[in-house]
Amino acid sequence: MSDVELEIPARPEYLSLARQAVAAIAAVEPRFRVERIDDLRVAVSEAITNAVEAHAAVGESARIRIRCHLDVDGDRITVEVVDQAGGFDPETVPVVPEVEDPSRLEHEHGLGIPIMRELADETDISPHGRGTAVRLVVYRSPTVAARPTSAPDGARPPGGLS
Amino acid sequence: MMFELQESTTDDGTTVLAVVGELDVGSAPRLRQELVRLAADEGRAPRVVLDLAGVDFLDSTGLGVLLGGAKRFRAQGGDLALARAEPQVRKVLEVTRVIEILPVHDDLGAALAALPRA
């Protein structure tokens, strides 16, 4: 399937719609496990939430672009969320204390990126134009994710949005 | 997007708050507002069960609100107990390990029993 692009205003009320659209694209592949689609939905939501908040912080009314690519054999979906909010450095995101730390309850933020990294099979955050691009890859099942991607039969490099 | 909060009170004065819908950056402020109100409302330690059976989506913004509520209630000698999370909601609590400080109870009875005595 070729790329599907979705553009939404950088506002919270569009988040649910965007999540549903991305989940529906993955569900085109009947072998995509329901729990993997749930993982995808959460990871994508985190990426878009970050973009919406970044736009709110800089007072930008520009739109967020969400590009989805279900690969040809249906093994994985790649979703790229691109904002135009000036960019940020993931290294500067404060690290939340471990749950054993009594001060853990003080931290209501900072869980978005850890959730993306945990639920997506690949997460890549990089500067893009005037903003940030977050690239997420989710495989249809844990077995497929564990398969080596550098197969000698001319397989494309993993995750490319070609 | 549908989002509802249904509040009831047990005989011993515990608040049971049923959340219905998706808990994300769009809806989380409403739950936060309600938890802040409950913390301010009660002259005594706030005891609140949050029934998550109707929540089909939870992300980090929703988690932040749950953590904030628990912090407020605990500071007043009360607590927030979570009940009946769907698997995809429980998973988000698990991968962030928030479940270790905010356990999810299988039913409302277990959640009520986990709260400090009135």
Image: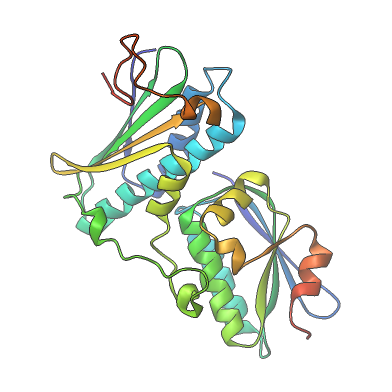
Q: Quadrant of residue B79?
A: bottom right
Give the percent coordinates (x, y) of residue A42: 49, 43
Q: Is residue B106 left or right of residue A93?
A: right
Going 55% across and 63% down the picture, which residue do you hit?
B98
Q: Going 40% across and 67% down the picture, which residue do you hit?
A: A96
Quarter occupied by the N terminus of chain A: top left
Q: Quadrant of residue A32?
A: top right
Eyeballing the image, is B118 above or below A33? below
Quarter-wise, where is residue A10 in the image? top left
x then y, percent, for residue A12: 40, 49
Query: In this rendering, is residue B79 above or below A75?
Result: below
**Nearest the camera: B95 or B39?**
B95
Extreme-top residue of the structure:
A153
Q: Depth check: A98 or B63 in front? A: A98
Residue A104: horizontal and vertical position, in percent?
47, 73
The answer to whether residue A149 is seen in the rendering is yes
Q: Is residue B59 left or right of residue B115?
A: left
